[in-house]
Amino acid sequence: MAWWFGIKLWKRVFLGLVLGVAFGLTVTQTMGPEAGEALLAKVRVIGDVFIRLIRMIVVPLVFFTLVAGIYAMGDPKKLGTIGIKAFALYLGTTFFANLIGLGMGTLFRPGDGVTLSEDGPRRELAADAPSIGERLMGIIPENPFAALVQGDILAVIFFALLLGVGLLMAREAGAAAGRFFEAVAEGILKMTHIIMELAPFGVFGLIAYVAGTQGIATFTAILSLTLAVYLGCAVHMLLVYGGLVRVVLRLPFVAYFRSILDPMMVAYSTSSSSATLPVTIRAATENLGIKKSVAGSVLPLGATINMDGTSLYLGIVALFTAQAFGYELAPQHYFLIALTAALVSIGTAGVPSASLFLLSIVLDVFNVDPAHIALVIGFIFPFDRLLDMMRTVTNVTGDTAVATAVAKWEGQLDEDIFRAKPLS
Ligand code: ASP
């Protein structure tokens, strides 16, 4: 057993990933798709247990780390500067994601030659998606306890921010409660350690199912769309986040990516930035050396509103639709697609395939026929998982890049930890 725990966690998780793909493909090859899927569904249970465990701690983690994070700032005014910097960077990086997405969609032209016949698969659109206005109002919880119970993250964030500020303003009288929140946050983070020991097996189960049921065939069926999304996300992560870390912050590029391998792999296998959040916070504080005041405030917000991978993806799919159905796009359409994709990505929940069902909002920019929208969603849906995995990795990486920058500018980054090799 000791040898197993002696291997670095990310290596074990990576092993789970690779073996999972191999296992999934082999099972489907040898047993055929149906019997294979039945077996893989059983194997996936371990992955589902893993996801449930990390989801279990998301709400308490966000609540306690956020209150503790604000409390650790020591001064309510800092909240304003940290908030402004984080927002500016979240928007700035999303702008580049849009450029890259539209660039990839133009370069690869993934929709050319795709015929989406009227009798192809259709998907009904989610008609009950809340409007932007409703979502904004929903940020203020009518009952914060209900928000906690329902896991309404934005509302929890709002309440936790104010509670942290309140405790700071109460000074001595709030100190005991402040320390209580810090202590619980510490304990929950330690729970992440326990749960992460299951990650290699969980990732194996999740990926085996995806590889076995989606297979290489789906990859090739939509080869250019997949290539455009994967390459776009990779370019964005390396150039924009890597550039931010290396050129703007003057920190080592390799150390940065090495430190966040755990959350990247968990994001890839779960396709959910909010499920990955506990792992992201852990990597940020323990490997990147980001102080709790910044990690605890910037990351929960980022997991909810900062989704560059999603924005990039929506831009590519919008161009895909235009190309597949022959819609002519004028220059202002490109601008509007970028703007809407960015807004939709802010409103997207950090759960699997969330953005695919909000695609219609982006496609409305160039008045796509609702029948065509349903066809596109029906066409992409079966293999959206493969695209979702990559955009979620990008979303999560973006959160850590922004948190690193804010921490550095606020003097809240321990560069010795950043440069050191990750411990686990
Ligand atoms: N699955 C993505 C995430 O959690 C959201 C999306 O569907 O784009 O980050």
Image (tube, rainbow, N blue to C red):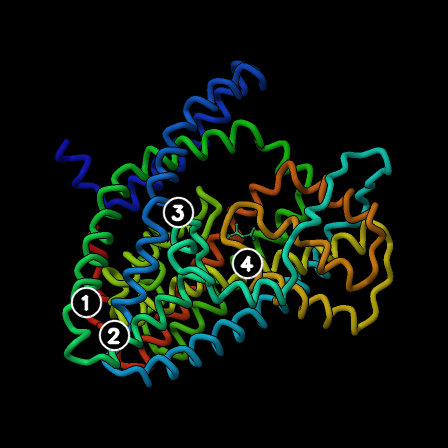
- Say left or right for 72 vs 344: left
Q: Is mark 2 within 8 Å of ligand 1?
A: no
Q: Is residue 11 above or below residue 348?
A: above
- Ranked by sequence position, the earlier of labels 3 and 2 is 2
How crowded is the residue under tag 2: few (<14 C-alpha within 10 Å), some, or many (20+)? many
- Label 3 sits on residue: 265
Residue 146 placed where, x, y %?
42, 53
How crowded is the residue under tag 1: few (<14 C-alpha within 10 Å), some, or many (20+)? some
- Ranked by sequence position, the earlier of labels 1 and 3 is 1
Q: Is residue 189 above or below residue 159?
A: above
Q: Are marks 2 and 4 in contact (CB under 8 Å)?
A: no
Q: CA distance from mark 4 to mark 3?
A: 15 Å
Q: Secondary structure at mark 2?
A: helix
Residue 396 placed where, x, y %?
44, 58
- Closer mark to the observer between disc 1 and disc 3: 1
- Label 2 sits on residue: 167
Q: CA distance from mark 3 to mark 2?
A: 36 Å
- Ranked by sequence position, the earlier of labels 4 and 3 is 3
- Label 4 sits on residue: 309
Q: Is mark 4 within 8 Å of ligand 1?
A: yes
The quadrant in which residue 404 appears is bottom left
Q: Are marks 2 and 1 in contact (CB under 8 Å)?
A: yes
Q: Are marks 4 and 3 in contact (CB under 8 Å)?
A: no
Residue 123 placed where, x, y %?
73, 39
Amino acid on which disc 1 is placed: Ala
Label placed on residue 177:
1
